[in-house]
Amino acid sequence: MASAHHEACAAKRRQRQAQIDASNTLLSSLPVSISPARELKIHTLPLSQIVAECSVGALSPKEVLVVYGKKTLEAQRRTNCVSDLLLDEALRDAEALDCDLETSDAGSSSAALREYPLLGVPVSIKDTVDVAGRSSTIGLSSRASQLASTSAPIVRLLRDAGALIYAKTTVPACLFANETVSDLFGRTTNPYSPSHGVGASSGGGGALLGCGGSVIEIATDMAGSARIPAHFCGLYGLKGSAGRFPNAQCGTSTPGLESVQIVAAPMARSLDDLEEFWKRVVGMRPWLYDFTCVPLPWRPVDLLLEGRKLKWGVIWDDGICPPTPACKRALSIVVQALKCQGHEVVAFTPPHAAELLTIGNELVFADGGDGIRNAGLPGEQLNRPLAQTLSVLALPRFVKQLLALATGTPALASLHRKSVAEERRLVVRRDELRADWHARWTTDNLDFVLSAPHPLPALANGDGDKASLLSVASTFLWNMLDYSAGIMPVTRVDAMVDSLPRTGKPVNPLWELYDAEGMHGLPVGVQIAGRRMEEEKVLEGMKVIVAAMQAAGTQYIASGE
């Protein structure tokens, strides 16, 4: 007899297949004729031009939706990245927008732009963000039939702005993972290589964008959940500080956790699209939609126009796991390009990195792992690193102390359920370390800090289970500090240039998963961090890097360009 878990998984997959079949039928039956040449043109339009052309009637939101709907179905076939399709709802929204624009008394495209700053822009959302009448599964069969009664503030804002929300994207069970796999939806694969993964937990969004199936993905990030998929899939992304971007009703497997906050983190296929999206969302005054948002308007920064030479710190090794050759080369490309433009680039050793990360893990699992352990139905499979963490949490303290000594991993001894007093002491210590970081950043007079987003490029399918959750140290650090952090693609793995030395032991156990030949052609990115609430400046810093790489002839060429 099938368990409730297996029945729920089977029902959800049947529902998704029915949506796919219905969407294929819907798109093929629409009285909208778009030539292949026009489809290609629409698909290559940047966000700002989609909005501009829709506002003057040169393009209709329905046409955009048809083009991206087809791309989404193709992306699903290639990578298994979609958890829920909302094309029918998005079509109604597109038709309503078309009708409103035709009958509007506004009389000008500028009025339409003011009212609908994201007019016709296709936006996909992670399967953690609430949409009324749809489930937000966080990859669990126990939530597959639980329908949200209201839509998240970001969803309401986007619809008011004229955006088209048409798909939800896959996530791993309970979100904490190194790859996007669940009993509910199966495995999501990399758009550049079906034998490699997309990272987690916003992996479905990374795959969809990497296939060209969306303009913007609303991802979330608590330890690199958006930035690592962006790195693995050759995308641009920005994790802001808590309170800068609408975040309410963006679900998590650790509800109520405030000491390490999850934040919404948009991803895009281009830097221009990412910046335009951020600017237009903030221009919608999200604090009127979402009580978690700080009422902070967009503050224009133009570092390129200023021409000021900037000071960049570089983390070559975070002390947890140094970047593998391909990831180190990506950093080197950026550093050399910046130096050629006269910028000051200095090595930066992150203060207290190991302690901050240990505190972060203790805070995330301060409930002893009960929130995650009790979230799924009996039989729900969690990824091995998360399951091992839960197993360690359940051990007696003296056993963990012995394990810590035997494995040389002192953090194991501190991984246990915390009392209220213990948790508060951790938060106090976290803030002391944040103060040290603030002082160090100020003393060194840094504008930005560069680092590898992850020690490796995209992992081979299944290798995520062999990597510790600590492999996200490079990204988790910035969540612990609540600093703004962006991701951008720089190069691709080159089997000849990026191979490991043939002799000697791996520098770190994680390096055993590195295979330059197998990873050949996969994207490799860098991470750029600024201080708290410096989202505008970080985006400008990314533009400085792009300009420097173009001048050096080392710019990244996206797939299909």
Image (spheres, rainbow, N blue to C red):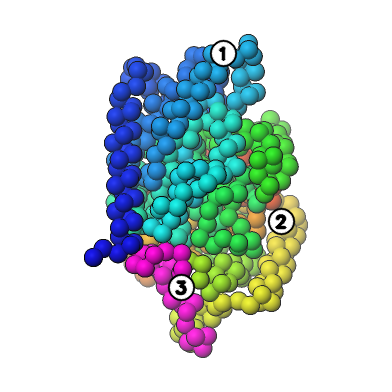
The residue singled out by tag 2 in the image is: 441
Quarter of the figure with the N terminus = bottom left
Q: Is residue 466 left or right of residue 132?
A: left
Q: Earlier in the sequence, mark 2 or mark 3?
A: 3
The residue singled out by tag 3 in the image is: 390
- State the image coordinates of residue 284 (x, y, percent, origin top left): 66, 33
Say which amino acid is labelled 3: Leu
- State the image coordinates of residue 250 (x, y, percent, origin top left): 55, 50
In the image, is residue 533 above or below residue 117?
A: below
The residue singled out by tag 1 in the image is: 103
Q: Secondary structure at mark 1?
A: helix
Q: Are marks 1 and 2 in contact (CB under 8 Å)?
A: no
Q: Earlier in the sequence, mark 1 or mark 3?
A: 1
Q: Is residue 403 left or right of residue 103?
A: left
Say which amino acid is labelled 1: Thr
Which span is picked out in magenta?
373-399
- Residue 380 in the magenta stretch? The answer is yes
Q: Which tag is nearer the camera, tag 2 or tag 3?
A: 3
